[in-house]
Amino acid sequence: TWLTSFRQDSGNRRNIFIIKKANIMNARNFFTWALLVLLPSTPSFGHEKVITAKELPAAAQTFINTHFKGKKITEAKKDVEMRKTCYDVTLDNGAKLEFDGKGAWKEIKCKSSAVPPATVPAAISKYVKANYPKGRIVKIERDQSGHEVELSDGTEIKFNKQWKVIRVGK
């Protein structure tokens, strides 16, 4: 597309026409357009979807029925981020659970009670009972490097894979 503009040269009192090519889609406009159109459809940038309890992996359903017997699922979400799937579940007692794509638990967070004792490894239970006799575990998290627990008083304890305490804090 060619654009024509008109300008008057004040020195010579002549009219000068300036013709220039208009760059309709400059780099900035193209980049903005690409972000708006392409990013929402890219699976690696996270996509969260509300699902039913029956759409959870079988292992997650079994875990909930075993350790949270009688509790109802109030919300379940499937989250796909960077090609990894995880599931977030909220129960009617306020507990929040996170599972990996296969249904193995990653995090258990209880608001009004302690996490189910059967979900806490024996070495962690022993350490907490010995060092925090009045503390109850209200959150437990596990990943490739080990486990982390949070006690009812806000203390956070990180354990490595060999069950050694590597960090304590609030």
Image (cartoon, helix red, strand yellow):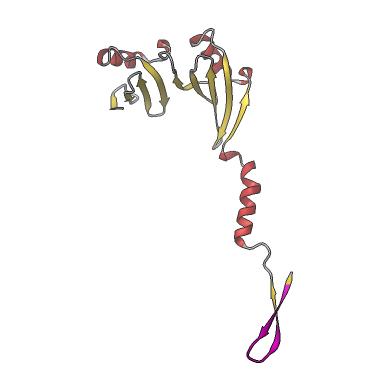
Identify which residue is drawn at 73% across, 72% down.
2
Main secondary structure along the magenta-highlighted residues: strand
The residue most toward the left is: 131
- 1 in the magenta segment: no
Residue 156: where, in percent of width, then height? 33, 25
Left or right: where 76 falls relative to 143: right
Q: Quadrant of residue 18?
A: bottom right
Q: Quadrant of residue 19?
A: bottom right
Q: Quadrant of residue 58?
A: top right
Residue 142: where, in percent of width, then height? 41, 24
Q: Nearer the viewer, residue 38 or 19?
A: 19
Residue 77: where, in percent of width, then height? 58, 26
Q: Nearer the viewer, residue 166 or 170?
A: 170
Q: Nearer the viewer, residue 11 or 3?
A: 11
- Quadrant in which the C terminus appears: top left
The span shown in magenta is 3-16
Identify which residue is drawn at 39% across, 15% down.
120
Residue 128: where, in percent of width, then height? 30, 16
The residue most toward the bottom is: 12
Q: In the rendered view, would you say 12 is above or below 135?
A: below
Q: In the rendered view, would you say 73 is above or below 25?
A: above
Left or right: where 84 falls relative to 160: right
Q: What number of labels is visible? A: 0
- 5 in the magenta segment: yes
Identify which residue is drawn at 35% across, 24% down.
161
- Quadrant in which the N terminus appears: bottom right
Q: In the rendered view, would you say 148 is above or below 70?
A: below
The residue most toward the top is: 70
